[in-house]
């Protein structure tokens, strides 16, 4: 086999493996780290809400990450040297859905603070607590942003 053909094959397969690893890492971060924790507090409507626009945008990007994993798997397991150039009908539907979901989440991420203005929640006035919304401003004194938990006063 020609050396250039082997290098081209390795380049495409290596890029596919790197894409899969990056997307799985991003999915792991979204599902088991800060973004989902922040959204959970927003959905529970407890006395304290932690809200970052990035959390909603990250969760909205989950379908795009999954789609990119499948695209990379398709490149990884195709016969021949070059990756497939035509998209399948399922791929067209999934790519459309994932792009629409991502853009909608970006829009929703910036509309949620506007919606919170019309609820009984108030933004904490301290600069380091800008992502916290509380029902009573006295609760801001009990928040420790390093632990993301409420510390009770003694």
Image (tube, rainbow, N blue to C red):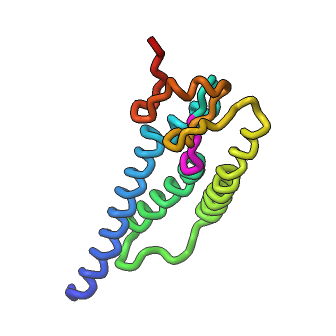
Q: Quadrant of the N terminus?
A: bottom left
106 or 123, nearer to the observer: 123
Q: How many marks?
A: 0
Residue 133: image quadrant is top right
Can residue 62 be spotted in the picture?
no
Percent coordinates x, y for residue 65 in the rendering: 50, 55
Residue 147 against residue 128 in the figure, above or below: above
Percent coordinates x, y for residue 7 in the rendering: 25, 81
112 or 30, nearer to the observer: 112
Q: Quadrant of the C terminus?
A: top left
Residue 140 against residue 32 in the figure, above or below: above
Residue 12 against residue 139 in the figure, above or below: below
Residue 44: image quadrant is top right
Percent coordinates x, y for residue 13 in the rendering: 32, 69
Residue at 56% x, 42% y: name it. Answer: 130
Residue at 47% x, 16% y: name it. Answer: 152
Residue at 36% x, 76% y: name it. Answer: 80
Residue 28 against residue 49 in the figure, above or below: below
Residue 17: image quadrant is bottom left
Q: Is residue 84 magenta?
A: no
15 or 103, nearer to the observer: 103
Percent coordinates x, y for residue 88 in the rendering: 59, 66
132 or 40, nearer to the observer: 132
Q: In this image, 87 relative to 83: left or right? A: right
- Write down the region rendered in magenta: 50-55
Q: Is residue 51 magenta?
A: yes
Q: In this image, 14 relative to 118: left or right? A: left
């Amino acid at each position: 086999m020609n050396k250039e053909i082997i290098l081209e094959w390795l380049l495409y397969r290596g890029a596919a493996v790197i894409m899969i690893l990056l997307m799985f890492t991003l999915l792991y971060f979204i599902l088991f780290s800060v973004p989902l924790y922040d959204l959970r507090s927003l959905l529970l409507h407890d006395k304290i809400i932690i809200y970052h626009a990035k959390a909603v945008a990250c969760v909205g990007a989950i379908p795009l990450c999954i789609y990119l994993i499948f695209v990379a798997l398709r490149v990884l397991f195709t016969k021949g040297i070059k990756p497939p150039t035509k998209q399948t009908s399922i791929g067209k539907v999934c790519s459309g859905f994932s792009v629409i979901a991502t853009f909608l989440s970006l829009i929703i991420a910036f509309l949620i603070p506007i919606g919170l203005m019309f609820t009984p929640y108030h933004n904490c006035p301290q600069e380091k607590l800008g992502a916290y919304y509380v029902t009573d401003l006295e609760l801001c004194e009990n928040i420790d942003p390093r632990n993301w938990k409420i510390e009770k006063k003694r």
